[in-house]
Image: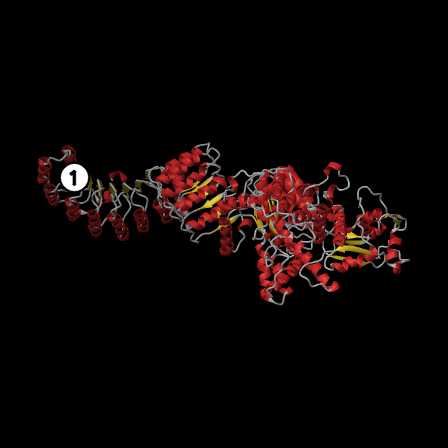
Amino acid sequence: MNLKEKVEVSLMDLLCEFFPEIKGLDLTRKNKKVLFILDGLDECRLPLKFDGNEIWSDITSPAPLDVLLTNLIKGNLLPHAHIWITTRPAAAGKIPHECIDRVTEVRGFNDEQKKEYFRKRFTDQNMADTIIDHVKKSKSLFIMCHIPVFCWISATVLQNILEKKSKDQTDDTQDSNSDDTPQTLTQMYTHFFRFQIQQSRRKYDGEYSPDISWDMDSIYSLGKLAFEQLEKSNLIFYESDLEECGIDVSKASVYSGMCTQIFKQDTGIILGTVYCFVHLSIQEFIAALYAHLFLDKNKKDVFVQEHMEPEAQNETLTGLLKTAVDKALESDTGHLDLFLRFLLGLSLESNRPLLRGLLSQEESNKQNNTEIVQYIKKKFEDSLCSERSINLFYCLNELNDQTLVQEIQKHLSEGSLSSSDLSPAQWSALAFVLLTSDEELKEFELQKFKKSDECLIRLLAVVKSSKQALLNDCNLTDKSCSALTDVLSSDNSLEELNMSNNNLQDSGVKLLCAGLKNIKCEIKKLSVSKCDLTEESCSALAAVLSSDSSSLKDLDMSRNNLQDDGVKRLSEGLKNTNCDLNKLSLSDCSIGEEGYKCLCSAVRSNPESHLIELDLRGNDPGETGVKLIYQLIQDHKWKLNTVRFLSSSSAVEAFEYLTETLGINPLLQREVNLSDHKLDESRVNQICDLLKDKHCHINTLILRDCGLTEESCSALASVLSSNISVKELDMSNNHLQDSGVKRLSDGLKNNCKLHKLTVSECSVEEEGYKCLCSAVRSNPESHLIELDLRGNDPGETGVKLIYQLIQDHKCKLNTVRFLSSSSAVEAFEYLTETLGINPLLQREVNLSGHKLDESRVNQICDLLKDKHCHINTLILRACGLTDEGVVALTSALNSNPSHLRKLDLSLNPLRDSGVEHLCALLSNSQFRLKTLDLCRCSIKKTQFDKMISALCSNPSHLRELNLSRNKIKDIGVKLLCRLLEHSQCKLEKLSLNDCKITDVTALTDTLAQTRALRFLKVLNLSNNNIKDQKKLHEVLKSSNCELNLNTLYMLLLTSVRAVRSSSDEEDGDTSKC
């Protein structure tokens, strides 16, 4: 097509010229499938003015070839046709991005494929291994081996050298030992060039001399062709090009035959013959050789030969090299890079012996070499792109100068790069060292060097060649984004880009998105977490996701304040059928319920959605967000199968535990009951981490009998301080104690939304009650309405403090459960209604004269059993208690014996069973009764005997004992003396009124012989027919006790009154007691 560059022709005529058989076909019809293959766009000499050419859509009207080609590619001509273009990367940049649907990159050999090539190339594996070892020793050579042609050149050269070694042949054409194998690119191509010329001489001229007779004119003409076409970036040539260089077209085959592996000609099918070098690198080497030949022959600089002033004659080699350096650096495409390396390499005297007879063999001028080396180093101070900088290092390598590289290698070995201030040359050296490292460039981590925009920009060439670029936490700004956009828009190896925790802001991400949409961008994973992004960045990234050129599979935007509006914008990209995203991370992005709805809607609206994994940790899904996501997961129409809600691994473990243990999804539950599951401290902490997560909306948590401790209370307190969803917490039947409640109370003080707290049966005592009251009072925003403290021991003040809290109108608490049984509650309500008191706040309850049936007695007993009941005076005079009632009452008092100080059971007849249980109560060492009133209880002798024994077993607390109107008689008095004789007896008042007593001798002797009178203040023997009182009087008078004798005399005088009739004894007059 280059031959028709200036011809105007219609597209149809052009096609028919190549393919006559399609003449007459209507290619514009949609059912005609047409594929154009444009092979070698980089060889096209047309200007390809995509922006400047006029729009052309008629395939039958003639137009310039450039107009036809640009309109065909843009789709104006034959819009339904498919076009397949092959080209080198530089030329691909001419095609507008919107015209490209797919890009396939044919990459060179990787390191393993390089080795594989040599092993397949040679049957002799020893030779293959020797060649591999040699090539690997030179980084520049091994890197070049990614080009298959260079592997072929290297194999050809090294095989020839090794075979010569094995035959012990000596090549006298070198001053140095001919066994020296090539170490640089120039040496390798020089060997190859010489070998190919030598081979052609042997094949066509029968010349076997080790010295070569060079065809100077032919090589000069061929070099001129190579150089002039290289300057124009032409890779194929035509007859006119050859003629311009003095090559007779009719003898072109001579050149092809002279070096068949260097220059070749191809006869086209239709339009004629084209010529080219076997590979561009060979053209570049021949062009560099020509520049030296031109200088040797004309003493002129090949770059300025046509415009040279007369005084510029006798150009030096150094001048030529400097000009070449400048020219190469001016090139945007780098088309002179390899040429410059060859040109510099050929300037070394050590590389010229192989070309003796072709190039001049001047003595080495070390000053010239030093001068060009310094010239190149100075160029690093200019603002060079990374590709040109890297090439300058390859140039220094060709000049055998490694000083800059060695400086950087020293920094690397010392680990001082992050703190060193590098010069521009050193930055470039660092990039070169990294690029030529023995290790494959899979990952580039900027933190290992310097955290700055400058460092990144200086090392862009390394980034460009790496698969992963880890640029997180490096103080980068939108300046770096602009530079990275250029990288993404050019040929690069990047598949993963991590920009997290940099101050990119929306402006930076917008710049980055321009590169992400480029057809050359292959980024599959992008991380822009914590980059100060807003909804504006979401719009830009949504456009990337919607682009048909995007390769993005994994996007991390976590820890940015995107909010619902940002997610809404991003969802537009998720809806697009071009979106190939597999994983999206939006953790800690301030997303609410609306954002979750948008995400679900976006996935559902895209039948082609590829989204598999979604990370929403640290957001607030509201009431329905989690449910909507799970509905999406359960719908098998969509590929989404993994959603991360929970921010910590600990919370995830709790989730898994609850799922396995209870068979539920805790994120979809409002109540979780773990009662009777033993939870150690670690498990409680995990559950608390789950409760703290905003995706967990558990309102009611039941942890009854779970083995919780005070440590568990600390963890749960942290939940109460931070979680707004937990409204009810049940920790009953756990050994929390006061210390645990104290820790739990810390959670009630701040931000607590708890409505109901249950800590029944938790071994809480007075201090714990105080802590609860203090916590609620200290929180004016407390939402606590209900408190369950059943089964605990409030001490002396606990209940009172709680009731004071209830009565405080500032406090919302209105329901407190103290009593463990419904029966006790009924007793509470009965006493409140009957006596008009709160029995939990009273120390005395007097039910005298209220007839209590068995059911009511049982209720009162259950109340007395409860530790919240602190009644110390219980008066049940004439209540009609049955034996069963007394048994129940004494059993109740026995279970909670510490509070009662006065018990009045008078005028209730006691039977054997009742007395037996009463005795058991009296024997209890924890029962500290001070006053016992059993007046007129029909106590029999046998019962009295047991009762005295019981009192003797626990006598130290009793101060008043009323046994009046019981027929204890004289034998009873004798039994009573056993109590008075007890060393621990401290009885102060003894009432034996109307007990049928006649003989007090035993009592008198006991009082006289024991310490009883030290305590006894009142002795009531009234209404008894006592015969001998004198001795008792004497004992009382001679006693030093504090007994009031007058009182005693009065009582004694009363006792001598006539005995009442039996009817009087049986009347119901309670005053006699």
Q: Depth check: give the residue in front, 397 or 600.
A: 397
Q: Depth check: give the residue in front, 63 or 79.
A: 63
Please name the residue shown 63% across and 65% down the image: 122
Q: Depth check: give the residue in front, 314 or 558.
A: 314
For badge 1, the amino acid type reads: Ser
For residue 825, above or below residue 197:
above
Instruction: Estimate the x, y position of residue 750 in percent, counting from the top left.
Output: 46, 36
Q: Which residue is mark 1?
A: 1055
Instruction: Estimate the x, y position of residue 45 in percent, counting from the top left.
Output: 80, 48
Q: Depth check: give the residue in front, 754 or 422.
A: 422
Q: How is the image coloured?
A: secondary structure
For residue 346, above or below residue 375:
below
Picture quarter with the C terminus: top left
Label 1: few (<14), some or many (≥20) within 10 Å?
many
Please name the residue shown 85% across and 56% down the image: 271
Instruction: Estimate the x, y position of residue 975 in percent, counting from the top left.
Output: 16, 48
Please name the residue shown 26% across and 46% down the image: 926
Q: Residue furthest bottom?
A: 123
Is residue 538 in view from this perspective? no
Q: Secondary structure at mark 1?
A: helix
Is residue 604 in view from this perspective? yes
Instruction: Estimate the x, y position of residue 261 in percent, counting from the top left.
Output: 72, 59
Residue 86 image-quadrant placement: bottom right
Q: Residue 57 vs residue 780: left or right?
A: right
Tally of marks = 1
Q: Residue 541 vs residue 1004: left or right?
A: right
